[in-house]
Image (cartoon, rainbow, N blue to C red):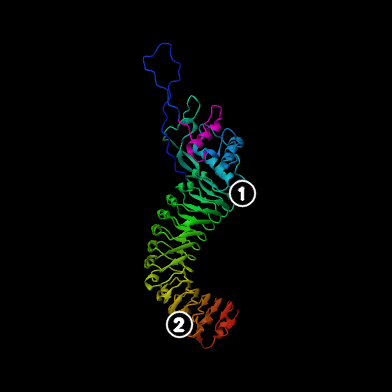
Amino acid sequence: SEAPSEAPSEAPSEASSEAPSDAPSDVPTLPPAATPIPSSAPSASPTMDIRTQVLDATLSFSGISDPSTFSFSDMDALGTPQQSALKFLLADDSILLDENTPLILACQRYSLMTMFFSLNGEEWEGTPTWATSTDECTWEGITCTETLVDATTLGTLDASSSGRLRQRQLHDETTMERIVTKIKLPDKNLAGSIPNEIMAFEHVTDLHLFKNGLTGRLPESIYNLANLQRLYLDDNDLRGFISDDIGKLENLEDVTLYGNQFSGSLPKGLSKLKKLNRFWASSMFFTGSLPTEMGDMESLKNLFIENNQLVSQIPSEMGQLENLRDLRIFGNILTGDIPATFSNLVNLETFYMDSCQLRGGLTDDVVRNWVKLADFQAFGNNFAGRIPDAFGELENLKVINLAENLLFGEIPQNLGASGNLQSLVVRNNRLTGPIPQGLAASTGILNINLSENDPDNDGSSGLDGEIPEFFGTFSSLRWLKLHGNRLQGEIPASLSDLSSLGECVFCTSPPHYIYG
């Protein structure tokens, strides 16, 4: 929202306009009044009609538009969205604007029209009431709420003898007015750059502009929307940096930025967003490190920053995010180990950190505390060591994918014993030992891929023993891949009765396939 500009100081009062009396006065003559300070925007002339004076006062004292973008003297002088908005309000609009109109309402209507002309409004889809002489609170995508706001009107402004509007006097008056609090225009064919006039909507809580054709950089003024709670800008073509000033949006709860061209570092200002529940900035061009300050985002539940160009170790401070439920950082270059502080993430349900070049090992002390974990995917890293037994203790675990690492030793025999496991993928490691018996309890399992654990094909690693008979009880099983191991014995005949089985691969030379 627009940070309210400071009210200018009161201009000096003028000398009396009464004609001097014939006789000299006993009172000393007053010095001439100081010249009024002109506003930043063009000032109203004595010939301006009331609507023009209201809009002139609005732009003068709000400061939302660059004075070079509009002109009151020639409506056709400039081809800017600001000029088009003024032209509409002065020539085509019949909504009442007079000396009793709160300037904040005039500013609201002008700013919506500037937004309309900035973002290709004539081509928007499903918005027939915009740019018509109807209450802007009835326009598609606009929600207004009775709000206590500044009551300044043209009538509360003084005019000098020259007719110029003088500096605004200080007023404490407020009024209840219908003020824009939500702008929801997703998938409406918006195109162009978000105008600076977005700052006028200081009471907006929801700004939904996703799935459009927005381009350019975010205006700095967007970081003044202090009441903003939900900011949805995904699936556009926005670019540039996200400023550290995002930390000024202290009421933000949900931000979606993915599907744009944003770049630069993740802003450290995120640490000031104490109410933020979700930050979604996937598949863009963010670079640099994960800010240690992210550990201060105490309300964060969902962090999606996958498929960027981050090069970083995982800050131990991220272990302070005790409310975190869904963490997705895959597709970046994250070196080092998973910090021991991640044992504090007791509410974690989804963990996607695959294809990141992480190394080290996973420890029981960390995994054991993830009691709510349902989906764990860390394939395509350089994890070494054993699969922690603690994974078998997680009652809610449904998916585990540790493929393409450097893991060795046996798969925990209790894995799947909870009965909830749906997918187990540990292919392309150096695991040994038997297929875990705990899987027998997970009768609803869909996917088992234990293949290629003897990558050198020399018998130095690979699962051994027999294919369990209980595989034939997995009526929902779709994929079963066991090749590239040292398994022996007969293939259970019951597997041929599994109607849902799409592909089954058992042996190594040559592989033996069964297709459902």
Whether the magenta-drawn stretch holds residue 39 is answered as yes
- Between residues 228 and 455, which one lies in front from this camera angle? 455
- Relative to 277, residue 137 above or below: above
Going by the image, does 292 lie left or right of 379? left
- Relative to 330, residue 499 above or below: below
- Relative to 90, residue 163 above or below: above
Indicate the position of residue 168 as horizontal and vertical percent values.
Answer: 45, 33
- Between residues 250 and 148, which one lies in front from this camera angle? 250
Q: CA distance from mark 1 to mark 2?
A: 61 Å
Q: Label 1 sits on what residue type?
A: Trp
Which region of the structure is painted magenta? 37-66
Bin the neighbour count of mark 1 within 10 Å (Cα to Cα): few under 14, some 14-19, many 20 and up: some
The residue most toward the top is: 23
- The mark found on residue 432 in the picture is 2
The residue most toward the bottom is: 489
> Does residue 204 appear anywhere in the picture?
no
State the quadrant of the C terminus.
bottom right
* Residue 35, quarter of picture: top left
Q: Label 2 sits on what residue type?
A: Thr
Bin the neighbour count of mark 2 within 10 Å (Cα to Cα): few under 14, some 14-19, many 20 and up: many
- Relative to 427, residue 255 above or below: above
Residue at left 45%, top 20%? 17
Looking at the rendered image, the disc whose residue lies closer to the viewer, 1 or 2, is 2
Secondary structure type for disc 1: loop
Q: Earlier in the sequence, mark 1 or mark 2?
A: 1
- The mark found on residue 124 in the picture is 1
